[in-house]
Image (cartoon, coloured by chain):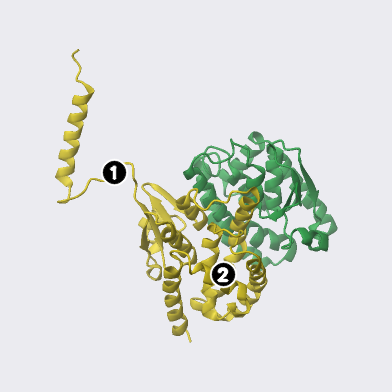
Amino acid sequence: MPASGILYGHPVSQPCRSVQWYLDYSGNTTVERKVVDIMAGAHKQPDYVAKFPNHQVPGFETEDGFCFAESSAILKHVSRDDEKIKPQTAKDEARLNEYFGRHYSQVRKFSTEVFFHHLLTKDEEKKQAGLVAIKPQLESYNEKLGKQKYILGDKLTLADFLFAPEVDQMEAVGKEVLAPYQNILKYLERLTTDVKGYKECIGGMRSGLEEMLKMM
Amino acid sequence: MGCTSSTDNKKAATATATAKAAAKAVPEALPVAEDKAKAVLHGHPLSQPCRSIQWYIAYAGKDVEVRDVDLMKGAQKAPEYVKKFPAGQVPAFEEGTFYLEESLAILSYIAGSDLKPVSQKDVILLDQYFGRHYAQVRKFSTKVIIPALLGDKETVPEGIETITPLLEDYNKLLGEQKFIVGDKLTLADFLFAPEVDQLQIMDILDKYPNILAYIKRLSEIKGYSEGWTKAKDIAEQLKASRQ
């Protein structure tokens, strides 16, 4: 049975994009999507905080009103009946969990230590430090994606849904960030042509960002 | 019929294998079952994520060898280590030629279906905890304990400020239920406990009686106290050496 409920998100938030992309990919029409205007501080308003005390996006509300956060938890929940995307063996599941750990401790720096400073704090020094911090990840994934189609191998997994929005958003920081990593760029092209919903995922980010910049 | 029977082939193969084994075997070596690859956890008694897994291994009585990595000497950056474990960190796990990093992955793999929650809500809460652990709870170590014992002590007061809202949240939660996900032990507790218990070394938990009561509950659970005692001793020595 396809997942139903409400996804609270924003088109520029990378973890929100991960979930929205999965919903489009899987052709889900039963999860309602609500935009939370984070620029206007909507995630800190009492009605949102009542559901999501840590005022995070993405947030998910199930049909019976149970609210939870964390992109990996939401992704796993909405894909729970998707036999194709789910890991098939204990070792596959271990690799996916290994990616989740790496995602939170390393890959999220693309957003928290680079994009955040580029867009919001305008702190050039911190942004440059962030670019240095993410270099090992860019090199490592560039090497990996030269040998295999997707993050965990030749099969699309939830790891790709988490990874791509973090890395593709670097285009907003500058073309020079990803230019040295041709395998990553080819990977993103592959996603655009081969994976349903990705084109809309990156398109939505570009138009959402354009709107945000107009208001800033 | 002219072809050797499969039994003859098997006998010949066994004879060859035995001869080969005898040629390189140490005296009295026992045969190792080919299909049971040895499981090894590379860890360190002070490392919080290593303690999570070591506690689970002791709790469930799993057949996993625990090997200490001499972090102070940089053993985790040695070429042979990094070849298997590119992140150059602990914990790291191997089972035959299967190499795995990241505490969440290692803990879940070793545990298999043990302690898995049943209700959809608890499954979600456990997954939510896994995300929150990395994004927030790890700050207990990265912002407070590690600077206090090994890094820049000046940053500790700010670190304590950072973790205070989290401690308040968990203190409230643990006043309402026995464990992190509900009233049953789950892998969330194995991840959470080594992050929070070490804060006792700095007298930070005095304000959070529910967390202290939770730790007391954990000390009744198999395998917990041994790991905590060992970590506590090392941590107190480090703290004393920096006074």
- Look at 14% across and 44% down and name the residue there: B23
Q: Which chain carries label 1?
A: B
Badge 1 crowding class, 10 Å Cα cut-off, few under 14, some 14 to 19, many 20 or more, is few
The C terminus of chain A, quarter of image: bottom right
- Residue denoted by label 1: B33
As drawn, the label of residue A203 is: none
Choose the circle earlier in sequence order: 1 or 2. 1
Q: Is residue A175 visible?
A: no
What x and y, as percent, mark residue B83? 39, 53
- Look at 43% across and 80% down and name the residue there: B237
Q: Which corner quadrant of the image does residue A57 belong to?
A: bottom right
Q: Nearer the viewer, residue B215 or B205?
A: B215
Q: Which of A89 and B148 is in front in this view?
A: A89
Residue A92 placement, left or right of A46 = left
Q: In this view, does A184 lie above or below B192?
A: above
Q: Can residue B156 be seen in this view?
A: yes
Residue B199 placement, left or right of B45 = right
- Look at 70% across and 67% down and name the residue there: A123
Q: Which corner quadrant of the image does residue A29 belong to?
A: top right
The green one among the chains is A
Residue A29 placement, left or right of B223 = right
- Residue denoted by label 2: B214
Q: Which residue lies furthest to the bottom in this view?
A: B243
Question: CA–CA distance between discs 1 and 2?
Answer: 42 Å
The yellow one among the chains is B
- Look at 39% across and 60% down and name the residue there: B42
Name which residue type carries label 1: Ala
Instruction: Determine whether the residue tagged by mark 1 lies in a helix, strand or loop.
Output: loop
The N terminus of chain A, quarter of image: top right
- Badge nearest the viewer, 1 or 2: 2
What x and y, as percent, mark residue B215? 54, 71
